[in-house]
Image (spheres, rainbow, N blue to C red):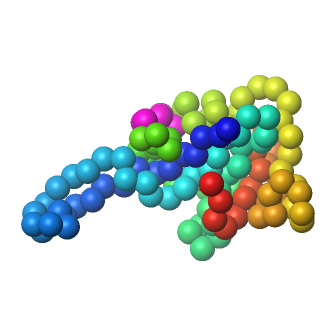
Amino acid sequence: MGTNYYVSETIDICPHCNSKIKSENVFGYHIGKSSGGWCFALHVDVDAGIKNLEDMNVFLIDKKIIDEYGKSITFEKLLNVIFRIGFRNRNQSEFERHENCVGHGEGPYDYISGEFS
């Protein structure tokens, strides 16, 4: 059981009448996933300029963050999720938990590339 975190985006045009609307809680960029017992899986994307947690911090500075249930979460609370105290199993590359693990962060988070949920 885990929880995915996203940047919330808005829809500006109604697909039916073409009028301007604002709709909250549309999933945008996938930030990462918290799974019980595992390090936080931080979604890195070199093409988007996100190679590590520091890049993610800069990217998220003016963004609204939501979880997969549409609930808003502050940046500070997201950091609390990422840095939960306690033992966490590491993601491993090549045939173990996550084949897209491209590195380990300096804290209880791992860098995961590509599509995952």
Instruction: Confirm whether the magenta stretch covers residue 74.
Output: yes
Q: Is residue 87 left or right of residue 7?
A: right
Q: Is residue 109 above or below residue 74?
A: below
Q: Is residue 105 left or right of residue 23?
A: right
Instruction: Quadrant for residue 100, please give it.
Output: bottom right
| Quarter of the picture holding the C terminus | bottom right
Q: Is residue 10 above or below residue 24?
A: below
Q: Is residue 99 above or below residue 63?
A: below
Instruction: Quadrant for residue 39, please give it.
Output: top right
Which residue occupies 56% across, 69% down?
Answer: 48
Which residue occupies 72% across, 58% down?
Answer: 112
Which residue occupies 72% across, 29% down?
Answer: 84
The percent coordinates of residue 76 (x first, y second) are 54, 32
Q: Is residue 94 left or right of residue 35?
A: right
Instruction: Quadrant for residue 20, please give it.
Output: bottom left
Q: Nearer the viewer, residue 43 or 95?
A: 95
The percent coordinates of residue 38 (x first, y second) are 79, 40
Magenta stretch, residue numbers: 71-75
Q: Is residue 78 left or right of residue 65?
A: right
Q: Is residue 54 visible?
A: no
Residue sticking out furthest to the top:
85
Q: Is residue 16 above or below residue 62?
A: below
